[in-house]
Amino acid sequence: MDGDQANFLMPNSHKSIPEHDLVIQVQQGDRRAFAELYERYKSSIYSYCLRLLGDRQIAEDSTHESFLKMFSECQSLRSPEFLRPWLFRIARNEVFARIRKTRRNGHFDDEAVWDTDTPHEQFVTNETSEIVRRLLQELRQEYREVLVLREYEQMSYAEIADITAATESSVKSRIFKARKALAARLKPYFQ
């Protein structure tokens, strides 16, 4: 991150300001308001990117790029109350752009994510959460994405439909199929 971008992350005094007001302030160029929104959403956006990408460094880069795009494109957000799904849509676009780019360059292999684990991460694979995470990564992208948004980000079907440009019924169907597929794969671990 260059010096100008690092200034986005200045200490803030906006803790008690409603999100709606922060968005309006960001649209007016207030970097402190941006820093507050960054603090409020960085963990969620990073977790979302990490669960879709499976790589910490790429997820971190995607998170930073998402926030930079959010700041530069904030004027296009017509209704401040839609910040959350709008920000997740930006992150989604960033994630899918990175996936397309790495696949075109021949550097991304879904199976290679597991070949590069550290010894500590290999040890942790025996834990239930690690098993679920690995199985989640094996789901097809469209099923993994909706399940992550619903289960980890606690989004409504309407919000997920908005982010993925799908219908609510399609989102519900994908979530149902993803849960069913995960349950089937988890069954041998918990018998």
Image (cartoon, helix red, strand yellow):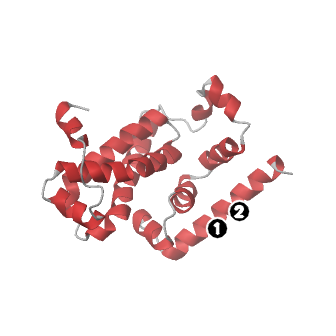
Amino acid type indicated by mark 2: Lys
Secondary structure, mark 1, is helix
**Mark 1 burial class by Cα count in 10 Å: few <14, some 14-19, many 20+:** some
Q: CA distance from mark 2 to mark 1?
A: 6 Å
Foreground residue among 25 and 84? 25
Residue 100 appears in the picture as rendered: yes
85 with respect to 173 (left or right): left
Name of the residue lying farthest toward the top? 119
State which quadrant residue 89 falls in.
bottom left
Numbered mark located on residue 114 in the image = none
In the picture of the structure, the residue carrying the numbered disc 2 is 180
In this orientation, which residue lies closer to the viewer: 57 or 185?
A: 57
In the visual, does 126 lie left or right of 92? right
Dividing the picture into quadrants, the one containing residue 147 is: bottom right
Q: Residues within 10 Å of mark 2 (few under 14, many from 20)?
A: few
Can you see residue 104? no
The image quadrant where one finds the N terminus is: top left
Helix, strand, or loop for circle 2? helix
- Residue for point 87% across, 51% down: 191
**Residue at image location 50% in from the left, 58% down from the top:** 153
Residue 124 location, x and y as percent? 68, 34
| Residue 115, horizontal then vertical, whole percent | 62, 28
Q: Marks 2 and 1: CB-CB under 8 Å?
A: yes
Asked if residue 58 is positioned above or below residue 46 in the image, the reply reads above
Q: Residue at x 46, y 39 (%)?
A: 103
In the rendered image, residue 160, in percent from the top left (x then y), is placed at 46, 66
Give the residue pinned by disc 1: 176
Closer to the camera, 28 or 61?
28
Report the amino acid beneath label 1.
Answer: Phe
Residue 159 found in image quarter: bottom left
Q: Is residue 132 above or below residue 160?
A: above
Q: Position of residue 6 (x, y in %)?
A: 23, 36
